[in-house]
Image (cartoon, helix red, strand yellow):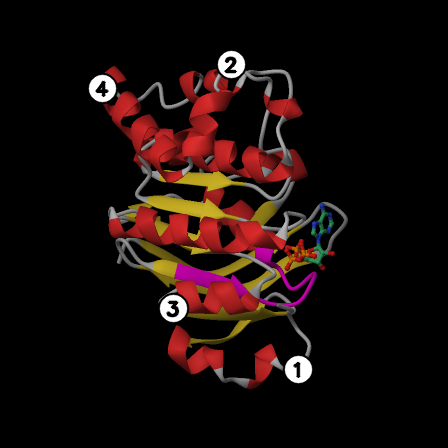
Amino acid sequence: MLLKAENIALRYPNGALGIEDVSIEIGDGQIVALVGANGAGKTTTCRVLSGFLKAEDTKIIRGRVMFDGLDVTGWEPHRLVKVGISAVPERNKIFRNLTVREHFTSTAMHRSRAERAEALDFGLQLFPMIRDRLKQCAGTLSGGQQQMVAIIRALVNSPRLLIVDEMTLGLHPSLQQPLFDALGTIARQGTACLVIDESTTHTVSTAQYCYLIEAGRITKHGPSQGFADSDFLTIGYVGG
Ligand code: ATP
């Protein structure tokens, strides 16, 4: 198993338990979806797995995260990137004043120039429209283009696991399919993906395996086919 998170609990500084008991497994090249209602703990889970804990001053109080056999519990993002975990967070995913090209040249310093160039080329093939925008300031791009830049930037790190939180939130619905298709291509090329998205239809049809999180606990998981017909899609947890 590439990633194995076991019984994670995390507390926010105000005392709130962000998540209480989260166990997730992701295999090499697998697409896994995490679904659940607002406030259930999806973003908090992403923070744990991608290391963005300090900014929120949060603490893992129970459990551990194993990645490729290595205990990476509580590691910061720059260390996780080196072992192969890259994330596209829900917010603050681009630097408004940097050009698009600068987003790609200011990351993945642990990779060789050739590796970075190859990964960038793969990312630009996924989203060809970004090739024409390399000199543009990222803050002037549309929301969809910014998301593409953020995904390509994560890919330049040549991750073994890509985590994308709220992949299409706030974007025009016509972008849902292309972004999910891109995720499929990324996974076929060997990179595992953990995706969170409010469009459950796309999420469940793209992922091979799903986890349902309710009030900070994983309450159900299994192959996506089993999820497509299940109650949780119809009882108002998640839309789309
Ligand atoms: P959404 O879809 O609304 O983003 P989510 O499933 O991603 O929801 P989280 O944002 O992870 O849920 O929130 C899980 C719990 O942690 C909630 O009870 C939330 O109020 C709490 N929480 C999240 N961020 C903070 C924070 N910075 N400080 C205190 N509590 C927080």
Give the labeled residue for mark 1: 235
Ranked by sequence position, the earlier of labels 3 and 1 is 3
Look at 30% across and 23% down and name the residue there.
116
Please name the residue shown 39% across and 31% down the image: 79
Using a 10 Å C-alpha cutoff, classify the residue at mark 3 as few (fewer than 14 neighbours), some (14 to 19) or many (20 or more): many
Pointer 2 residue Cβ closer than 8 Å to ligand 1 = no
Residue 91: x percent and y percent?
A: 64, 39
Nearest to viewer (mark 2 / mark 1): 2
Tell which of 60 and 186 is nearer to you.
186
Front of the two marks 4 and 2: 2
Neighbours of disc 2 within 10 Å: few (<14), some (14-19), many (20+):
few
User: What residue does disc 4 label?
Assistant: 114
- Quadrant of res 121: top left
Q: Earlier in the sequence, mark 4 or mark 1?
A: 4
86 is higher (above) or lower (below) than 104: below
Q: Which one is earlier in the sequence, the residue at label 4 or at label 3?
A: 4
Mark 4 → mark 3, Cα distance in angstroms: 33 Å
What residue do we see at 31% from left, 58% from top? 30
Mark closer to the observer (4, 3): 4
Q: CA distance from mark 4 to mark 2?
A: 21 Å
Residue wearing tag 3: 209
- Three-letter amino acid code of the residue under disc 3: Tyr
Q: Which mark is residue 135?
A: 2
Task: Give the magenta range.
Answer: 32-42
| Quarter the N terminus occupies | bottom left
> As shown in the figure, which amino acid type bears the numbered disc 2?
Lys
Verify CB contact (< 8 Å) between mark 4 and mark 2.
Answer: no
